[in-house]
Image (cartoon, rainbow, N blue to C red):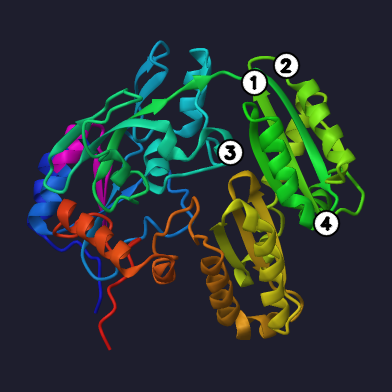
Amino acid sequence: MATNRITHAAFLNDLAATMSDNRFEAAGDHVTARPRSTAEVAAFVSCCARYNIAIVPVGGDTGLSGGTNLPANRPAARLSLNRMSAIRSVDPDRWTMTVEAGVTIEAIQDAATEAGRAFAPDWGARGTATIGGAISTDAGGTNVVRYGNMRENILGIEVVLADGTIWDGLRALRKDSSGYDLKQLFIGGEGTLGVVTAAVVRLVPATPHRATALVALAGLDQLAAFVEHVRTAATDTVTALELMSDEGIRTAADRFDLSHPLPGRASHHVLVSLRAGTPVTDALSELLKTAAEWGLISDAAVAVSADQESALWRFRELQSPTESRPEVVADSLKYDIAVPLDHVGALLHRSQAVVDESGTNARIHAFGHVGDGNIHLYVLAGADIEGFRSVRETVRTDIDDLVFELGGTLSAEHGVGTLLRDRVGPQKSAIEWELMRRVKDTFDPANLFNPEKMLPEVQSPT
């Protein structure tokens, strides 16, 4: 029978000698190590390698794709990096900060602010999510449209490799053409190639001036043109373009006793945020005026205070059904999709058509980072839950196929983990998957790190 039990007494004895001061826990069938230093991580990895114990790295454990699940078919131990929470240095003159893997995103943001700088990546779980986990999944968030994914915000990393070797790649260079950019293999690698223990993160100028508006689109067909208008008119200041449906806003308003900022009947809205070192209020007003004249938007609510801005962002944070409609989540389908920018409208229209063809009263609920093409899409079951359950897998497969047809991905910022591992195969060619497996075999020939994640299983020839 498949098991992940730790049965090697010698392994536990060696681990006790390696991880003193209660830095590992053995409870029943499971072991969790909680090192305080890179040297301890290396010692732990070496110990696991000697006994062929798989290692599952864990950061803030806020992932949504099963990336920290224990493997089913071999002994494994969890490696929690939450005690490695030191900010090693803040270097405003270099526009960098060096942090250990267990530092939270919020702590990095706060330290950057104190130094007169900013750390750009941001999302709702900032107080729990750690930089190590964010690097592992190449996390995105609300500011990607201006500052890029985690990849664009990491200059160097420190990694423990499968034999316990420590690679110190903590360089603060913006330009380095001296060879392969090895750090990029670990960013988004979901802990399958090594354990990231520290990173040099990129800091950006602080943006004390901001302007935010919730815009009612004249129609979903105007979405692409409106996004193009904002990105062109506010190239250097736009930080966020967030799509919300009117149904999602109304649901949040009803559930949490909030006032709808635009109580008209537009089907979709976009939250626009401009930030800069100098005032941007006039720029936002001019941008919205032009959009209205061109027939792209029908209304707008502009925040005139910090409280109003927070209220608008509150609606964005409540778009997920896990926040506003937890009772429907169990029977829903959940997607973290990215498609080319000009295909977002087609994704929403055609995914609803897929649901309509299922013959149930299910519906699409979509929201997210429309400025970079990343849409969080749910298929919510209606009153006929049993009917939806009977067609659920067909709907899922059809939407998967639609995403691939549109040149998109099923994993934009949440990772592949176990949730998508069996579904992402058609997204890439056979040679691309083979190249990735060769990288895995080179860095981790014993499949020590986070097995049964990300890479689809090799299909046997028929």
Secondary structure found at label 1: strand
Q: Earlier in the sequence, mark 2 or mark 3?
A: 3
Q: Name the residue under label 4.
A: 267
Q: Which residue is drawn at 26% across and 44% down?
A: 195
The residue identified by callout 3 is: 145
Of the numbered discs 1 and 3, the one sitting upstream in the chain is 3
Specify whether residue 303 is in view: no
Q: Tell me the element at label 4.
A: loop
Residue at label 1? 276
Residue type at numbered disc 4: Ser
The tally of labels here is 4
Closer to the chain start, of discs 2 and 4, is 4
Check if mark 4's residue and mark 3's residue have beta carbons within 8 Å.
no
Q: Earlier in the sequence, mark 4 or mark 3?
A: 3
Q: What stretch is highlighted in magenta?
A: 22-43
x then y, percent, for residue 160: 20, 40
Q: Quadrant of the rendered structure where residue 344 is? A: bottom right
Question: Which mark identifies residue 279?
Answer: 2
Residue 359, position in %: x, y?
73, 85
